[in-house]
Image: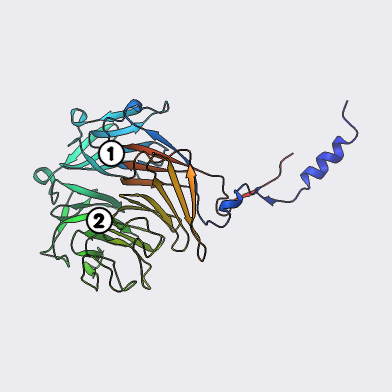
Amino acid sequence: MKHPLSSLLVAVTLAAPVTRAADTTPVAFKDVPFPVIERFENFGKADGIPAEKVHAVYKTSDGQLWIGTWNGLCVRGEDGKFKRYGPEDGLSHKMVLCIVEDPRTGDLWVATMRGLNRFSGGKFTVYTQTNSGLPNNVVYGVDVLDDHVWVATAAGAGSMHLKTGEWKIYDHNNSAMHEPWCYAIKGARDKVYIGVWGGGIIEHDPRRGSFKEYRDPDRDFHYDLVPDDGPINDITSWLSWEDGVLWQCTYFGFARYEGRGWKTWVEEKTPLLSNFTQIVWPHRRVAWIGMDKGVSVTDGQTWVNYEVGAKGEGIRTIHRPGQPPEVQTLPTALANCFVLGIYVDDDEAWFATSNGLSRGVFAPYQRPATVAQNRP
């Protein structure tokens, strides 16, 4: 028999207003405008990773996790174990340096020390200097923009039209580059940014065929003599772009450019953990920076650093504007403090290191614009 108050309870429940999801963010992190890692999970050879050194990590749109290692390309299965692909499977070289997905087709593009690879339908297609027009077989970076795949190589940048297979090469002979050694490349709406080892950053507009050069005004390789005056250094070890923000990694500091001016950071004078920055992954206008001492995360104001202590413990330091740093010990740490690759989304962070792979598990936090309904 129905309880006499059940109808009233249902009516009240259905009439309940829409409310925001309960805020479960720990008090210590309420003023940190991005997720904070509370613990790390580490993976190595016991999990099927064939080499200690992991160069790249990337999650595709179907949720699969791929890593590039010193000894092959790997994908993580549902059981948590990694399946390896190597030269015997059609991969052009065992050392994988960069991975990216074509968002329209789901094809995986894999940069190696000897050629570019397209992984589609379970098979590899290899592009080299001799069979396709690739600028150089040492491919450091790769990205896909519209109908072109772009590469950064040891002898210039290049683009291949995905429908015709035609290559175009850009180097010191036909662009603003002062040298052809390119370390990184990133598509940015209608432009392409090229990170040149000793030549700063090149902005290329493919439709107009124009090039714009960004160089360090100080022209000093060791010090940032005038902060915020331009790229922090001509040696560009990596770059990335998202939401109108360009981020530059160098071995002498870190920089950001939003089209209205530059902002630079160096260790000791700022919360940046180390000047030796080698990878940046931007997510929601927050930069996750990998370096030789761990990871720094910042929106430009607040910083959180993750280090590995002398006893292997995790160390998390939170730098809030106008406040002294807050140092905390974590029960777990990065697999290694030398970080070579990063992937971050709303749910988790992954780090490729010189001694295995790490997953950063976030403390509870409210995602942007999260709204939920009360349900009976």
Mark 1–mark 2 distance (CA, rounded to whole Å) = 18 Å
Quarter of the image where one finds residue 355: top left
Rendering colour mode: rainbow
Picture coordinates of residue 312, whole percent (x, y): 39, 39
Closest to the camera, between mark 1 and mark 2, is 2
Residue density around tag 2, few if under 14, some if 14–19, many if 20 or more, within 10 Å: many
Q: Is residue 251 above or below residue 373?
A: below
Q: Residue furthest front?
A: 310
User: Is residue 347 among the parts visible in the rendering?
Assistant: no
Height in image: 102 above or below 237? above
Q: Check disc 1 and report its element: helix, strand or loop.
A: strand
**In what quadrant of the picture does the C terminus appear?**
top right
Residue that label 2 marks = 237
Q: Of 156 and 315, which appears nearest the observer?
A: 315
Residue ID at (38%, 46%): 343
In the image, what residue type sits under mark 1?
Gly
Residue indicated by mark 1: 68
Dot 2 lies on which element?
A: loop
Q: Where is residue 254? Give x, y as percent.
A: 33, 61
What kind of residue is marked 2? Ser
Q: Residue at x 19, y 58 (%)?
A: 197
Q: Position of residue 92 (x, y in %)?
A: 17, 36
Residue, x 36% and y 38% (percent of image)? 335
**In terms of depth relative to the viewer, which is nearer, 267 or 204?**
267
Point out the image quarter for the N terminus.
top right
